[in-house]
Image (cartoon, helix red, strand yellow):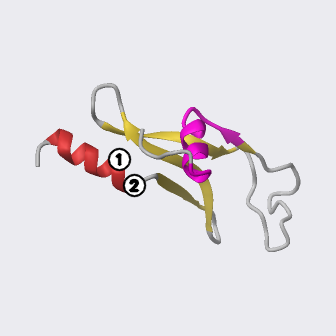
């Protein structure tokens, strides 16, 4: 297969990429990205959601393991595409 065919297959097969970050005791969800085609035709992963900078890890009860502060999720430029995919509004990019 040529590059364009591989890119088409990849963007059709993979909707999202999950990025996990290691803490001292476990892995923490850091970011979710959507897979789409760049204007150049290459495959790219664009951030859809990411954890707010500086958020501490949560313990089993949901408390901040680093001593306070509210955890947040920040939408990125890929959020509209992820939202469409999650609500059945169409896939692909």
User: Furthest-front residue in view?
Assistant: 89
Q: In the rendered image, is residue 53 in sight?
A: no
Task: Report helix, strand or loop for mark 1.
Answer: helix
Residue pictured at 28% horizontal, 35% vertical: 42
Answer whether residue 56 is visible to the viewer in this image. yes
Check if residue 75 falls in the magenta segment: yes
Query: Residue 44's spot in the image, x, y percent?
Result: 37, 39
Give the class, few, some or many, for how many residues have Cα within 10 Å of label 1's Cα (few <14, many ≥20). Answer: many
> Which image quadrant is residue 73 in?
top right
Residue positioned 83% across, 66% down in the render: 62
Location of mark 1 (residue): 11
Q: Is residue 90 left or right of residue 62?
A: left
Rate crowding at label 2 as few (under 14), some (14 to 19) or many (20 or more) other CA atoms within 10 Å. Answer: few
In the image, 88 versus 80, the foreground residue is 88
Q: Secondary structure at mark 2?
A: loop
Region of the chain picked out in magenta, as a range: 74-88
Disc ID at residue 82? none
Q: Please tell me whether residue 30 belongs to the stretch shown in magenta.
A: no
């Amino acid at each position: 297969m040529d590059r364009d065919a591989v890119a088409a297959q990849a963007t059709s097969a993979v909707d999202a990429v999950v990025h996990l970050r290691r803490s001292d005791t476990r892995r923490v969800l850091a970011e979710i990205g959507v897979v789409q085609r760049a204007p150049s035709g290459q495959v790219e992963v664009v951030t859809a959601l990411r954890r707010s900078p500086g958020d501490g890890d949560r313990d089993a009860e949901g408390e901040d393991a680093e001593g306070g502060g509210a955890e947040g999720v920040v939408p990125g430029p890929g959020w509209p595409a992820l939202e469409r995919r999650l609500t059945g509004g169409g896939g692909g990019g």
